[in-house]
Structure formats: structure tokens, C-alpha cells
Amino acid sequence: MITKHFFGSLEDGREIYSYMMKNANGMTVRICEFGGAIMEIRVPDRWGRMSDVVGGYDSLRDYVLGDGYLGALIGRVGNRICDGKYTLDGKEYTAFINNGKNSLHGGQVGFSHKIWSVKPIDGEEPRLVLTLVSPDGDEGYPGTLTVTVTYALLKSNALSIHYEATTDQRTIVNLTNHAYFNLGGYASGKVFDHVLQMDADRYLPTDDSLIPTGELRAVDGTPFDFREPKTIGRDFDMENPDIKIAGGFDHCFCFAGGETKEPVLRVEVYEPNSGRMMQVYTNQPAIQFYSGNFLNNPEHPLKGGYPQNLQALFCLETQKMPDSINHPNFDNIVLDPGEKYDYTTIYQFSVKN
Ligand code: GLA
């Protein structure tokens, strides 16, 4: 079932709506036209009690002015581009600098701050088809990029996100979603007890502006080794230069074997108190695991007035490696006319006793 709700008006008077999808188990997912943001995901715990497991805001104003990209779709290029500069076919481009000396998450008005057009397709597995046309030169990126993101709420209590894009000129693209999770409920405190497992054998160390140095470092013997399940908190305070720079986890993890044809299970997170588990399936080659190290802005409290709190939510942003365009040994994020950007990420929810 899909229902449409008025959410708020922008300064120019434009009305913004949200869409609530619900499946037969009572799981709900709410998506906003603004930023295509996931505003709410309600899933049962091991006793069948529903909680909202993603961070979000109560007011449109916070989505417009807040700085954490809560639940938003990210583009054209997720994460940071060093100095906002890159070269494509011999031509230098400059993306908007909005994060120290770097460009972050698409620039000044990235996809997280655009109004998406939403087509609801109701049914047993309700879907929302979001589209956006990013004009040639938008935020310094070449080519008209036509983007479709389909959110589907599956019978199995999964949220599937299908990303598609085409261009009329050679360009770069690296899309993701920036949902912040806490499987105990978004207002349940720090996420250190969550048990995380990731099929990632390498991670990307960064400089102090969080730009990858270019090295793909083996996770062996580091706090970044999540190949066997361990709590997010276990090695959080370990003396480690990479953790220190980022104030926690805020790193790209590269999946063993890289990109796959179909989505495969790559990440599993379990919250022992509620019993909730989330599994991430994707065909993307990498994931940014971010432990909410900047989440402390008192001006933008979360839903219900709950304050932002460091490490009280985490993100698992499937994508290609950040700043790939400036590192020949990283992923290829170039998209040519006639080619289709086509990736799927599935967040599967369940419980474990
Ligand atoms: C990403 C980045 C973080 C931070 C957040 C947004 O996850 O890796 O460094 O910028 O987005 O606050």
C-alpha cells in the first residue's frame, strides 16, 4: 500500500510530499520528494515490536539546511573529490567545493537537495520510481544525466534500491543513499553494540581531509577487519592513525572480488538487544562505512526532537571508491553515452534470536 502525505513547503512555496509504502507484514518505508530521502523505516524486533531504525528530521527545513545528508540520495558523485578537480578527456572540471578544500556528495545542490519526481506503483510489493534530470554543467559536471531510482518494499521485509542513469556526453557518476541506521531504533543511543560483518578485504586509508591516499590496504590486523563478525565498538578506540583522522570509521571498504553482475550478500549487521538484523546485498564493488562521527549538530535535532549524538547512527553507503576519477588504480566511474549505469542495493531486515 502507498499513501501520500504533505510534508512541508519550501521558501518558494513549492509543496513537498512524502510517500509511505507498507507491506503485508506492516513494515513501512517513507520516502521524501526532497532529496529522495528515506525518512523512516519501521521494522519489527524479535518480539514483533516495530521501531523506526533510520535517522531523519521532522521538518522540511531541517532537510534543506541540515548538513548530514540524512537518508538522502547522493549524486552525481558520492563522497569527496580532491580539491573538487578532475580531468576527463583532457579537459579540467571543477566541482563545487563544500567540504574544506574538497567537493562532497555532489556539490552545493547535489541530488540530496533536489526535488525528485515520484511515481508510485502500488501492489503487494509497492514501488516508488524517482526520476531526476540533471542538466549539462550541473554543479560542474558535463552531460545531461537522466537518473531513475526505484525504491521497492519487498514482501520479505527488504528495501531494494535500483539506481539507473544515462548521459548524452561522457561524464562521471557514483550514486548512493545516505541512510543512517540504528537497529535498536534511531533514538536508542550509541551503535557500538551492533555486530558487523563485511566481506571486505581492503580499505582505503585517507589523508587528513578524508581523501583516499591511493593505497588499497589489506584489512588484516587492523581495526578495519570485519571479515569475522565483531562489534562496531570493539576496535573503535584503538590507537590507529586512520581511525584518528576520521574520528571513527569513515572509510571505503572494498569488497572481495569487486563488482558483481547480480547483487550479492556483502554486509550483515545485528543488534543483540532488539534481535534486528540487516543484510546488505549489492553489485557495487565498495561501501563507505561511516560511524556518524560528525553527527552532533544541535541546530537540527532528529525526529521527535531527539538530539543528534556521535556514533548513534551509522551509514553503509554502497558505491564505487571515493575520488576514483583522480586515482587510476581505483574504480571506473566514467559513464559514456549509450551506456547504462545500473546498480542495485538491497537492505534486507529480519530478526535473530
Ligand atoms: C559521508 C562522508 C562523511 C561525512 C558524511 C556526511 O559518509 O564519508 O565524512 O561527510 O558523508 O556528514
Image: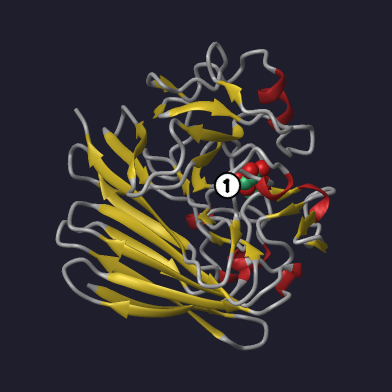
Q: Where, by quadrant of the figure, is residue 65 drawn?
A: bottom right
- Tell me the SS state at disc 1: loop
Tell me, yes or no, if residue 118 can be seen here: yes
Q: Residue at x 39, y 78 (%)?
A: 5
Q: Is residue 248 above or below residue 343?
A: above
- Image quadrant containing the N terminus: bottom left
Q: Nearer the viewer, residue 213 or 113?
A: 213
Q: How many marks?
A: 1
Is the image coloured rainbow, by chain, by secondary structure, or in one colour? secondary structure
User: 37 left or right of 94?
Assistant: left
User: 86 left or right of 275?
Assistant: right
At label 1, the amino acid type is Pro
> Residue extending furthest bottom?
13
Q: For disc 1, does the CB lie below 8 Å from ligand 1? A: no
Q: Residue at x 78, y 57 (%)?
A: 87
Other residues around mark 1 within 10 Å, as few (<14) / some (14–19) / many (≥20): some
Q: Position of residue 72 (x, y in %)?
A: 53, 60
Q: Where, by quadrant of the figure, is residue 334 drawn?
A: bottom right
**Residue labelled with disc 1:** 307
Q: Position of residue 83 (x, y in %)?
A: 83, 50
- Image quadrant containing the C terminus: top left
Q: Residue at x 23, y 45 (%)?
A: 49
Q: Is residue 233 above or below residue 12?
A: above
Q: Nearer the viewer, residue 121 or 281?
A: 281
Q: Nearer the viewer, residue 141 or 294?
A: 141
Q: Is residue 334 above or below residue 210?
A: below
Q: Where, by quadrant of the figure, is residue 196 drawn?
A: top left
Tell me, yes or no, if residue 314 can be seen here: no
Q: Position of residue 202 (x, y in %)?
A: 54, 26
Q: Position of residue 300 (x, y in %)?
A: 63, 56
User: 101 left or right of 121?
Assistant: right
